[in-house]
Image (cartoon, rainbow, N blue to C red):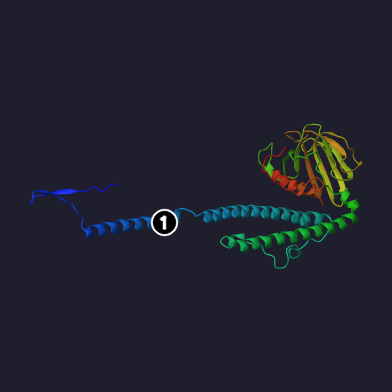
Amino acid sequence: MRNIKKYYFDTTTNTFERFVVPLRKKVIRIFGFISGSVVLAIIMAAIAFKYLDSPKAKITRTEIGIMNEKYQLYQAEIDELNKSIKELESRDNQIYRAIFEATPLPDSIRFGKNYSEIDFSKYKYKSVDEILESMEEKIAAIKNRIQIQKKSYDSLQIYASTKEAMLKRIPAIQPVSNKDLSRVASGFGYRIDPVYKTPKMHTGLDFAAPIGTPIYATADGTIREANFDAGGYGNHVIINHGYGYQTLYGHMIRIKARGGEQVKRGQVIGYVGSTGKSTGPHCHYEVIKNNTKIDPIHYFFNDLSPTDYERMIKISAANNQSFD
């Protein structure tokens, strides 16, 4: 850039004189410019450090985000495994071992003497190694419980082989074909009475199905009763299975079995209807053990996987209106 010369008019000499900046002013101006530049650079660096990530920091932040997502996913899977195995353990102790008259396994065997649930929240601010170690501990605990449960089933299989005749007479299937589990209309427990619209104890399961759908005996036994009850179960069948078990099938449009007849599990004993105190076509099904009506939901173990069983419980637990 061309250096521009500046002049001023000197009134004392009446001539134009060249304007010269004193050296001191030049030094001050240069120092001020340098100082301002340094301050501006410091400010910009501070802003960049605070708000902008370096390439390495960006990679680290991304990796942490991915690791956190995986941790949440693994934690959810572990929780789901825990839930499933707890259900298996509950069925083992409360149903299967009760049926086979076997002693329930104590928690000291299932979990170990020093077992306690691992609280993952305490690892929220821990290192990756500590978090992974805690997850490994929980996975190891689940594996141990699975092995214990497998041994339990092996022992139950021995019980079953020695009680084959008894097993045939224990209710173990659904009374109507219900593979998609869509026919459970009302479960065991207090439900709204369809006639009086008040809460009432519902002592069985209602399976909604079209009129004429076959109804099956859920275990081997002898037909104790095959009658009509106008104010209650309508056309109904009661089977005596022995070992303290009986089952009742109500509201049939037609009874096929006859009193005193010997029937096998899966044999057709009648057809779905809406006779007696009923508001729609369905099969009302009851399981009676030692003269006490119990929840039939626990007696479908030949039909249902653990996942289906859990789904069936949720469906039957809905607080809805019964059909009878």
Callout 1: 10 Å neighbours few (<14), some, many (20+)? few
Q: What residue is pinned by disc 1?
A: 45
**Residue 211's spot in the image, x, y percent?**
79, 31
* 146, above or below 303, in the image: below
**Residue 111's spot in the image, x, y percent?**
73, 63
Q: Quadrant of residue 286?
A: top right
Question: Horizontal placement of 167 versus 180: left or right?
Answer: right
Q: Residue at x 78, y 42 (%)?
A: 285
Q: Quadrant of residue 34?
A: bottom left
Q: Residue furthest bottom?
A: 114
The answer to whether residue 188 is seen in the rendering is: no
Q: Quadrant of residue 137?
A: bottom right
Q: Which quadrant is the C terminus positioned in? A: top right
Q: Residue at x 85, y 51 (%)?
A: 244
- Which residue type carries mark 1? Ala
The answer to whether residue 47 is seen in the rendering is: yes
* 249, above or below 147, in the image: above
**Residue 118's spot in the image, x, y percent?**
65, 62
Q: Between 47 and 295, which is closer to the camera in this rendering?
A: 47
Q: Residue at x 81, y 54 (%)?
A: 96
SS assignment at label 1: helix
**What number of labels is visible?**
1
**Residue 275's spot in the image, x, y percent?**
78, 33
